[in-house]
Image (tube, rainbow, N blue to C red):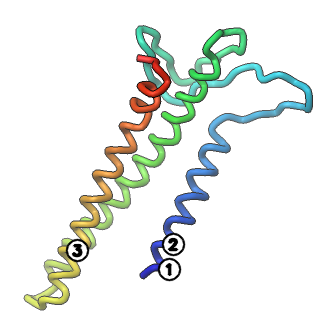
């Protein structure tokens, strides 16, 4: 069981790391300054709304924060969608095991645990949606 958990943690680490690394492409040569970023997810900071595809220039005073929040939104959206797909699959699997258990206490217990872990996964997915708000609060951007 511990090997499975460790494998899942490593897989999620590499998946999230890959998403973060690919969230903003950098083609900078040594000595070049960054020019900004491209927004990949719609979000709002204060009264200003940013849409998918908007270009943020490095001449803007707060471009680093805006690009960071854009990356956080992009990554947490992917995490949310992947976790919700996994939750749906686990609930369907747990329901299938429960319906086919024929009163066997072992299978019923396994199905109950599977559905319980799926609900915990759904709570974690919903918390992933709250991360961008927490980042905006910590950085002082409303």
Residue 22, percent across and down?
Answer: 66, 42
Badge 3 density bin: few <14, some 14–19, many ≥20, Cα 10 Å: few
Residue 129, percent across and down?
Answer: 37, 39
| The quarter of the displayed image where residue 90 is located | bottom left
Quadrant location of the C terminus in the rendered image: top left
Quadrant location of the N terminus in the rendered image: bottom left
State the SS at label 1: helix
**Disc sitting over residue 51 in the figure:** none
Residue holding disc 1: 3
Badge 1 density bin: few <14, some 14–19, many ≥20, Cα 10 Å: few
Q: CA distance from mark 1 to mark 2?
A: 5 Å
| The quarter of the displayed image where residue 100 is located | bottom left
Residue 10, percent across and down?
Answer: 56, 65
State the SS at label 2: helix
Q: CA distance from mark 2 to mark 3?
A: 19 Å
| The quarter of the displayed image where residue 85 is located | bottom left
Q: Are marks 1 and 2 in contact (CB under 8 Å)?
A: yes
**Disc sitting over residue 6 in the figure:** 2
**Disc sitting over residue 113 in the figure:** 3
Tell whether 30 sits left or right of 24.
Answer: right
Q: CA distance from mark 3 to mark 1?
A: 19 Å
Up-down relation of residue 124 to residue 139 (above or below): below
State the SS at label 3: helix
Up-down relation of residue 76 to residue 48 (above or below): below
């Amino acid at each position: 069981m511990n090997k499975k958990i460790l494998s899942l943690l490593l897989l999620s680490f590499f998946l999230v790391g890959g998403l973060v690394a690919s969230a903003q492409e950098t083609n900078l040569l040594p000595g070049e300054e960054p020019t900004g970023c491209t927004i990949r997810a719609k979000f709002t900071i204060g009264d200003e709304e940013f849409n998918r595809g908007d270009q943020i220039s490095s001449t803007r005073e707060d471009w680093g924060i805006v690009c960071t929040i854009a990356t956080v939104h992009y990554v947490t959206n992917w995490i949310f969608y992947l976790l919700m797909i996994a939750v749906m699959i686990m609930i369907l699997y747990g329901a299938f095991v429960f319906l086919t258990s024929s009163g066997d206490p072992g299978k019923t217990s396994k199905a109950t645990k599977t559905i319980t872990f799926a609900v915990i996964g759904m709570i974690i997915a919903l918390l992933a949606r709250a991360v961008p708000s927490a980042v905006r609060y910590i950085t002082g951007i409303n």
